Amino acid sequence: MNAFAFCPRCAAPLVDRVVDTEQRRACSANCGFVHYDNPTPVVAVIVEHEGAVVLARNRAWPKHLDFYGLITGFLERAESPSQCAVREVKEELDLDAAEPTLVGVYPFERMNQVIIAYHAFATGTITLNDELDAYKHVPPQMCRVWPAGTGFALRDWLRSKGIEPEMIPLSR
């Protein structure tokens, strides 16, 4: 289901139409508006703190899932991805991150996002913000990864350290 039903320029209904060989939502009144539905850039951070990887649990995730993930956040206007990584570590964990290093860029089709993943060493005492309800320190050798966006980033970072992680299935 597409979130856009009406043109933001002229309020005419949007219709499905082929634009530049791709199916798009476009203005039925032909004012020129086309909704391209481009992916949203998200920054993920593999936070290394006190010799372990910090995995966190988002308060909004279903309670029946015992899932912990990487620190993530939306890239802000005029912010570089590495600045976003440092900011998100501070906002979500209250830790000071050193200059992050790029791990890779990963598609996350389910959420229509592109994930720009970093690794950063961080110092300080963890204090969770209101987005998170729990965290855990996991030694790199004990990290397990998941078959989606940030899980692939963690997998690639672990492999760069000579660790072949166990892949866990995602439950819904």
Image (tube, helix red, strand yellow):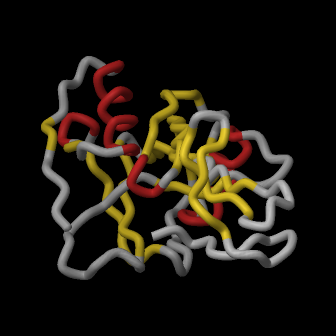
Locate residue 140 relative to residue 92 in the image: left or right.
left
Identified at 68% across, 38% down, the residue is: 82
Locate residue 46 relative to residue 39 in the image: left or right.
left
Within the image, what quadrant is residue 149 found in?
top left
Identified at 80% across, 71% down, the residue is: 8
The location of residue 10, given as percent across then percent down, is 86, 73
The location of residue 160, given as percent across then percent down, is 35, 19
Locate residue 109 relative to residue 86 in the image: left or right.
left
Locate residue 135 relative to residue 26 in the image: left or right.
left
Does 23 appear above or below 88?
Answer: above
The location of residue 21, given as percent across then percent down, is 59, 34
Asked whether residue 148 appears in the rendered view, the answer is yes
Does 13 appear above or below 79?
Answer: below
The location of residue 34, given as percent across then percent down, is 73, 54
Quadrant in which the C terminus appears: bottom left
Identified at 27% across, 49% down, the residue is: 138
Quadrant in which the N terminus appears: bottom left
Front residue (pair 84, 89): 84
Asked whether residue 40 appears in the rendered view, the answer is no
Within the image, what quadrant is residue 16 found in?
bottom right
